[in-house]
Amino acid sequence: MQRAAPQTFERVLSSMCTEPHPDAREAAARFLATNPGDPATYAEISELEARAVAGLGRLAGFDVPEPGSVTVDTGSGIRTTATPDAPNGYITSGGTEANIQAVRSARNRSDAADPNVVAPESVHFSITKAADVLGVELRTVPTDEDHRVDVDAVSAAIDSETVLVVGVAGTTEYGRVDPIPALVDLAHDAGAYCHVDAAWGGFLLPFTDHEWNFAHAPIDSLTIDPHKCGRAVIPAGGLLFRDAAGMDALAVDTPYLESTSQASLTGTRSGAGVASAVAAMDALWPDGYRREYERADRLARWFAAKLRERSVDVADVELPIVVGDLDGQTFHALRDRGWRLSRTGDGLVRVVVMPHVTREMLRAFLGDLDAVR
C-alpha cells in the first residue's frame, strides 16, 4: 500500500488549526493509548488533564497556582485545582463539544419549561448544533456595523425562559470581540448563565486590552481551544466553568468503569490531545504566545494594507483575521492555484493569520493575486 502523506500548510490561509509545537507532537506520541475518559484507570493522563485545565485557567483570567500544585478527583472524573477560585473543566475534542456542553449545562441547571439560548448571528455554527441536539430554542440577534453583537437586541430577545446568553471573543469570520461584561450583566439580571466562545481567540486575547475572560466579568463558562493558536495537536479543545456546579450538571454515573462518573460528552477521549496541550502551554506560556500574537498582528495589518494598495476593500483588523472583497472569478482563480481560501457568510474572502502563515507566503499570495486580476 502506498504511504499517504498529510497535506502541508504551505498554502493554507483558511484554517484556524496549525502546525503543532514540537514538544506537543512528542508528548502526544507518548500518550496515544491513554483515555482521560476513565481517570481512575489512567491516572497519569488524568493528572495531566488537571494541569491542562489549570493552564487554560491562567490564560482565561483565574488566579491559578503554578504547575505541580493541582489536585484531581479521579473518583468523580471532575478535575479541579487547589484554589477555590480556580476553574473546573476538561479537555474536549474541540470548540464544538465545548459549546454543546456549555448549552447542556445551562439547560440542565435551569427549570425553564421551554428553554432558549440567545446568541449573536456571528456565533459559531456549533451553537446551532447544540440547540438542535438538546432541544432548546436558539434566538440569534443582529450584530452592529463593526460585526459585534448588538447589546440592545440581546436585551430584547431575553425572557424568563432564557437559560444562556452567548458572547464570542474572537469571531470565526471577522475576529471580533463582543462586549462580554455587558452580556454577563444582561444574562445574570435575567437569571440566566453567560458563556463565552473564545475557541480561537483565547490564546491571543491575553495580550490585548479586550475584556473577555473570568477576571473581567463573572462569566459562567468559556470555550478555549489549545489545538488552535495554542499549538497543541488535534483534538484538544477546552471547556472551563467558574464553579463546580457547571460540571456537576453534566455528570452521569459510570458503574462499570473504575471512575464512578463522567462529565464529558464523549466517553473515550484523546490522551494525546491532553498531553500535547500541557506540553505546548509549558513551552509557550506566556512569552512564546505573546511573541506569536504580536507577529500575527503585525503580519495581518501589513497584509491588509497591501490589499488596500490593490484597491481591495478590507475590514479593520481586530484580531489577526483579514477579510476583503474579492470577486468570485478572482477567488476561484486563486483556489485553482492551490490557495486554501474560505468566505464569510456575506461572501467576503477570509484569511486567518495562524502561526504557519509567513510574510513569504502572503507575498506569494499577493503575486498570484496580481497575476489573476
Image (cartoon, rainbow, N blue to C red):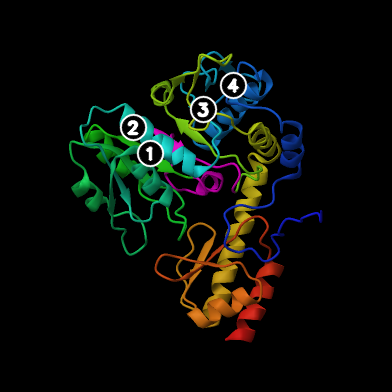
Report the residue marked by disc 3.
63
User: Where does the C terminus fall, quadrant-wise?
Assistant: bottom right
The Cα–Cα distance between marks 1 and 4, rounded to whole angstroms, is 27 Å
Q: Secondary structure at mark 2?
A: helix
Which residue is label 1 attached to?
Answer: 195
- The reply to whether discs 1 and 2 touch (Cβ–Cβ < 8 Å) is yes
- Mark 4: secondary structure: loop
| Closer to us: 339 or 240 | 339
2 or 3: tag closer to the N-terminus: 3
Label 2 Cα neighbours within 10 Å, binned few <14 / some 14-19 / many ≥20: many
Separation of marks 1 and 2 at Cα, in angstroms: 9 Å
Mark sitting earlier along the chain (3/1): 3
Q: Are dots 3 and 1 in contact, CB under 8 Å?
A: no
Left or right side of 27 for 176: left
Q: Earlier in the sequence, mark 1 or mark 4?
A: 4
Q: Which residue is mark 4?
A: 38
- Of labels 2 and 4, earlier in sequence is 4
Residue at image coords 77%, 38%: 26
Give whichever of discs 1 and 2 has the lower sequence position.
2
Residue 218 colored magenta? yes
How many neighbours does mark 1 have within 10 angstroms: few (below 14), some (14-19), or many (20 or more)? many
Which label lies toward us, 2 or 3?
A: 2
Highlighted magenta segment, given as a residue range: 199-228
- Residue 177 rendering spot, x and y as whole percentages: 42, 52
Q: Are marks 1 and 4 in contact (CB under 8 Å)?
A: no
Mark 3 and mark 1: Cα distance apart in space = 19 Å
Label 2 sits on what residue type? Ala
Mark 1 residue type: His
Q: Which residue is mark 2?
A: 106
